Image (cartoon, rainbow, N blue to C red):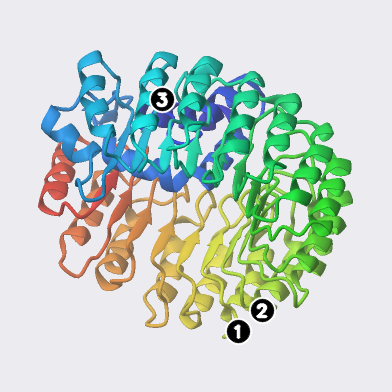
């Protein structure tokens, strides 16, 4: 499993070229023995952005019916670069990813940047020398409100150049993204100065940098300045320890504007999380998003998190995935989640050592909390019995859940009847992720009864690696052609072969099919079928086939 997930991340690295945090996840997966968990995190957190990158840069190559490794995207002609990288002059946006910058191309872009409101250049091989030019752009372009430079080797020197521009009185930047830019605690001094001097800055994303507790303490000092109006702070993978909580709590006390705080993938531990929760309860900030994935949390700190849920009706998005909270911890969380004061909308509980025993609590939550729209239970041992309990809740008209992620939950064909029955009555559910479960062709046949029902409004259906073959593709094709609400279908990692792919393509060709994204990752087919897929994309350009 670990090797396959590292391979999955490696392929994403070459196709999406470090979109969001894919490169950081790959690097950490290769360094540690937890590659699978990083892969699950990438699938859960970054799939939408990775999909966009794959759609734009998909590369196909076949030799004797077997897929080759995807090639790096070639340099685009200038006209095509302009079409893909630059939006209309009315929007004044520069949005480029995964492009190697030569001097002439960089000079061309600098001219454009002078009138841009947004500059996004993730993974463009930028360095500190480019930051000198960007400093000049910031100085001379007061309309610039967003600067996104993730996955570039800027270093502390590059950030120092950027901050010189950010400190000018004419600067009105609102959003700054510097994820995975090879920064250290040294950058935090200059960033602190920006926080103190620029009330326009409302978002700071510096995850996947080795800032450490020392560096983030300095950032917290900047947040405490009255001029600082920060609303979103992202500090994932920053090598933080429990010692950071005191500084964070002091910043929370003085910063009622803060709406989103992400501390995932830092070794905080239960005691630190308890202190953080106490700080949140005591502070006047109206936090809306709190991410604490892979922070060393157990059931021991779940009561404190529950108290936050009871006391902060502003909190709508809670993620505690990849923590060993278990069924006992979830029961404690549900005490807060069930409180009338709690207005939770998104709840991420992936890989939390949950079993079917917790599904009774989850079912009650789904029924009682009409604000709850999205639950991720990826990589928990729910099994068929747990899924059947969840489906009982989904069948109730009071359920308002719109997204359910039960990927890799030990499900089999046996639970498909309950899922199908829930789909026949539930009009709210829009997204259903059931990949990495042994549903089989028989399971798809059973699910189709619910999916075809007039009450079913599923828009996104994920069935990757579900032991499907060409035998179920006629049923899938019928669903695609009959249900106009279905816009996204994932069949990756299933041995569908030429026969199955051709049936799927036949459905896509039909005018009644409204599919926008068809995901066929890691499926082998012949060169002839590959030509047919290319022809299909040309005839129906609104359909993105990701493979």
Q: Which mark is residue 102?
A: none
Which quadrant of the figure contains the N terminus? top right
Query: Which of marks 3 and 1 precedes in the sequence?
Result: 3
| Label 1 element class | loop
Against 138, residue 388 (above or below) is below
Which quadrant of the figure contains the C terminus? top left
Quarter of the view holding residue 92: top left
Q: Which mark is residue 135?
A: 3
User: Which marked residue is nearer to the observer: mark 3 or mark 2?
Assistant: 3
Q: Is residue 198 or residue 72 the one in the foreground?
A: 198
> Contact (CB < 8 A) between labels 1 and 2?
yes
Q: Do we see residue 431 in this rendering?
A: yes
Q: Position of residue 399 (x, y in %)?
A: 59, 79
Taking 462 as reference, is 299 left or right?
right
Against 146, residue 429 (above or below) is below
Q: Position of residue 501 (x, y in %)?
A: 26, 49
| Label 2 element class | helix
Q: Which residue is mark 2?
A: 367
Q: Is residue 547 or residue 543 the one in the foreground?
A: 543
Q: Position of residue 43 (x, y in %)?
A: 51, 43
**Seen from this angle, which residue lies furthest front?**
169
> Contact (CB < 8 A) between labels 1 and 3?
no
Q: Which residue is mark 1?
A: 398
Label 1: few (<14), some or many (≥20) within 10 Å? some
Query: Which of marks 2 and 3 precedes in the sequence?
Result: 3
Disc 3 from disc 2: Cα separation: 53 Å
Query: Which of marks 2 and 1 precedes in the sequence?
Result: 2
Q: Is residue 241 or residue 302 the one in the foreground?
A: 241
Label 3: few (<14), some or many (≥20) within 10 Å? many
* Residue at (60% x, 47% y) in the render: 230
Disc 1 from disc 2: Cα separation: 6 Å
């Amino acid at each position: 499993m670990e090797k396959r997930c590292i391979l999955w991340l490696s392929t994403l690295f070459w196709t999406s070229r470090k979109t969001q945090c894919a490169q950081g996840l790959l690097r950490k997966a290769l360094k540690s023995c937890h590659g699978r968990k990083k892969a699950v995190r990438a699938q859960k957190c970054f799939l939408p952005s990775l999909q966009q990158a794959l759609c734009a840069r998909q590369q196909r190559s076949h030799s004797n019916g077997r897929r080759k490794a995807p090639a790096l995207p070639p340099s685009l002609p200038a006209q095509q670069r302009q079409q893909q990288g630059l939006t209309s002059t009315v929007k004044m946006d520069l949005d480029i990813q995964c492009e190697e910058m030569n001097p002439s191309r960089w000079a061309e872009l600098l001219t454009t940047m002078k009138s841009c409101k947004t500059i996004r250049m993730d993974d463009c091989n930028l360095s500190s020398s480019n930051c000198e030019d960007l400093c000049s752009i910031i100085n001379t372009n007061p309309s610039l409100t967003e600067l996104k430079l993730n996955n570039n080797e800027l270093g502390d020197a590059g950030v120092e150049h950027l901050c010189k521009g950010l400190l000018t009185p004419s600067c009105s930047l609102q959003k700054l993204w510097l994820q995975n830019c090879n920064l250290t605690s040294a950058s935090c001094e200059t960033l602190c100065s920006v926080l103190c001097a620029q009330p326009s800055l409302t978002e700071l994303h510096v995850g996947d940098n080795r800032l450490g507790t020392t560096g983030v303490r300095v950032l917290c000092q900047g947040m405490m300045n009255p001029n600082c109006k920060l609303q979103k702070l992202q500090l994932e993978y920053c090598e933080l320890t429990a010692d950071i909580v005191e500084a964070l709590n002091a910043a929370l006390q003085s910063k009622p504007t803060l709406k989103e705080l992400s501390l995932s993938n830092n070794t905080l531990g239960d005691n630190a999380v308890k202190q953080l929760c106490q700080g949140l309860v005591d502070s006047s900030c109206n936090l809306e998003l709190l991410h604490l994935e892979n922070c060393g949390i157990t059931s021991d700190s779940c009561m404190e998190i529950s108290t936050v849920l009871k006391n902060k009706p502003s909190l709508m998005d809670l993620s505690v995935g990849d923590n060993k909270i278990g069924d006992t911890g979830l029961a404690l969380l549900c005490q807060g989640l069930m409180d009338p004061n709690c207005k939770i909308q998104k709840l991420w509980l992936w890989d939390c050592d949950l079993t079917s025993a917790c599904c009774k609590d989850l079912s009650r939550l789904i029924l009682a909390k009409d604000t709850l729209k999205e639950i991720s239970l990826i990589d928990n041992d729910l099994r068929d019995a747990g899924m059947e309990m969840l489906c009982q809740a989904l069948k109730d008209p009071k359920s308002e859940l719109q997204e359910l992620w039960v990927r890799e939950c030990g499900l089999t064909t046996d639970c498909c009847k309950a899922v199908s029955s829930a789909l026949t009555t539930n009009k709210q559910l829009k997204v259903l992720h059931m990949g990495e479960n042994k549903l089989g062709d028989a399971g798809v046949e059973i699910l189709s009864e619910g999916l075809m029902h007039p009450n079913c409004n599923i828009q996104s259906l994920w069935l990757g690696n579900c032991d499907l073959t060409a035998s179920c593709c006629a049923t899938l094709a019928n669903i695609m052609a009959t249900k106009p609400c279905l816009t996204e279908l994932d069949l990756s990692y299933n041995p569908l072969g030429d026969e199955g792919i051709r049936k799927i393509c036949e459905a896509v060709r039909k005018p009644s099919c409204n599919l926008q994204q068809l995901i066929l990752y890691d499926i082998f087919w012949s060169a002839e079928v590959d030509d047919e897929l290319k022809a299909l994309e040309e005839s129906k350009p609104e359909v993105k086939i990701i493979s």
